[in-house]
Image (tube, rainbow, N blue to C red):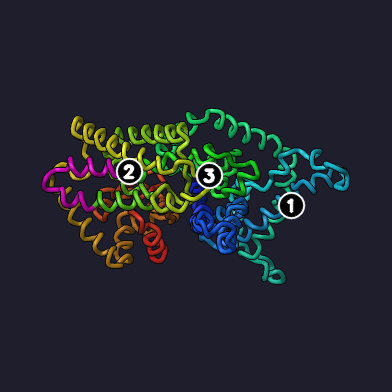
Amino acid sequence: MGILAYLQRIGRALMVPVAVLPAAAILIGIGNWINGMPWGSGNIIATFLTQSGLAIIDNMAILFAIGVAYGMSKDKDGAAALSGLVGFLIITTLLSTNSYALFNGISTKQPDWEKLVPLAYAKINNQFIGILVGIISAEIYNRFNAIELHKTLAFFSGKRLVPIIVSVVMLFVSVILYFIWPMVFSVLTLFGEQIKDLGSAGAGIYGFFNRLLIPVGLHHALNSVFWFDVANVNDIPNFLGGEKTIKAGTAIIGVTGRYQAGFFPIMMFGLPGAALAMYHTAKKGNKDKTASIMLAAAFAAFFTGITEPLEFAFMFVAPVLYVIHAVLTGISLFIAATMQWISGFAFSAGFIDMMLQSQNPLAVHWYMLILQGIVFFFVYYIVFRFVIVKFNLKTPGREDDDIDNATVGTEATLTQENAAGGDLSKLAEQYLVVIGGKENLTNIDSCITRLRLNVHDTDLIDEQAAKALGAMAVIKLGKTGVQIVVGQQAEKIADQLKKLV
């Protein structure tokens, strides 16, 4: 497996712990709403809800260890998740401040003894360590989950053996980290501080690369650097923490959230503006079909912040539009950060998250993001419409009128109707044929909108037939990796594929 494919595996595994964040956002958001009412100050229900949400936020590091181990395991087994938990507990215990003091003869009874311990050990409980432990645990699981021991030790064979192996391996990993962790921590912190020092420009640069990496699925890895405590930025947990993180000094009003705020104008308004432009520039005979696709995608982007169905509609057929989209995203994050129009999210920058976080004490002039979004709606519409017409780009509804495309459109419509009716097993069977049969498959996975597959040979995949089944894009990654963008039923289709093979 190439380095790109491996990074993609890590990226999609990161979505497992991140998927827990909406629960925290809802609990904290409702708590903040109640607390913000004239009658709600100090309300016990508000406190109950907020503290419940913070319980998730405060333990994101351990959730990353468990989630990444589970997400990268080849059969998504609980033994891998348990191994991630075991590994994380061992490392964070052996490299804690108390353990460092014990190893170095520092008495914990003397005043200010913590100052004698390097800061790196006080920060060992972070998402970077969680991701590292998760990766190691998953690799051990994938390699040793089928090992059979002598019959006298048969109880500990197979998956039961994995947490035991992980616990031993983590002893050696802890020894290595004891010597190198301070240096690694310093490098990560320096990177995070340099990005912070760039201020609004840093937010803009991040926004540009966030969109640019979506085609190859590496944006999740980039997001973890800015959104979580990998490089000492930790934007999402600090924002969701609200009053607690303000008092702790880890959140700054008007600053925390700047790696999130600028996405709201893009996802809620900019991309729907692009959808309208693609609809208006579609050929007359294709307008009805284009309208249904664009309307559904724009609705998802506005309310939930899920933009992949819209972005993949023009990402590969009109790459210049996608680069423009990435640039405009960077500009939006720069403007929001500069003006200190701040809001945050747990899942994505859609209307639901905006409303949930509107009462967060770190949400500053969040309503201005709506005005910024209206401006971006017209910017996207005008720019996209001009470029599409000027360069005759083949965006949805503007394809060449040949027999193949007519057939594809008809088959796609029929297949989508079958999927809407719940006949996903038949759709999965059709996708199995498209990707060269089960003999060509080596691994099946999915994320929000994509099938992420490993195959023996990507040349056996019929891209045209995949699009005939309703796929928005087929992304081949070398000879053995492929992503098929199928929409929000990706996980269900992947589950059906697993049953078939």
Q: Where is residue 364 in the image (x, y as percent from the top left)?
A: 48, 41
Residue on which the image places disc 1:
93
Amino acid type of the residue that numbered disc 2 sits on in the rendered structure: Phe
- Measured from the top left, where is residue 74 in percent x and y? 51, 57
Is residue 286 shown in magenta?
Answer: yes
- Part of the protein shown in magenta: 270-292
Q: Nearer the viewer, mark 1 or mark 3?
A: 3
Residue mark closest to the camera, 2 vs 1 = 2
Spatial CA span between label 2 and label 3: 23 Å
Dividing the picture into quadrants, the one containing residue 209 is top left
Residue at position x 44%, y 32% from top?
334
Query: Which kind of residue does numbered mark 1 sit on?
Result: Thr
Magenta stretch mostly in which secondary structure? helix
Residue 93: % across, % down: 74, 52
Residue annotated with mark 2: 269
| CB under 8 Å between discs 2 and 3 | no
Chain-order first, disc 2 or disc 3 = 2
Marked residue nearer the N-terminal end (2 or 1): 1
Mark toward the viewer: 2 or 3 = 3
**Rendered view: 280 above or below 204:** below
> Horizontal placement of 198 versus 490: left or right?
right
The reply to whether the magenta stretch includes residue 343 is no
> Residue drawn at (83%, 41%), measured in percent from left and top?
112
What element does badge 1 sit on? helix
Category of crowding for the residue at label 2, using alpha-carbon neighbours closer than 10 angstroms: few (below 14), some (14–19), many (at least 20) = many
Asked whether the residues under the numbered discs 1 and 3 touch, taking CB atoms below 8 Å apart as contact, a structural biologist would say: no
User: Is label 3 in a helix, a strand or a loop?
Assistant: loop
Q: Is residue 176 visible?
A: no
Q: Which residue in the structure is indicated by mark 3?
A: 362
Judged from the image, the secondary structure of the residue bearing numbered disc 2 is helix
Between residues 183 and 480, which one lies in front from this camera angle?
183
Name the kind of residue labelled 3 in the image: Leu
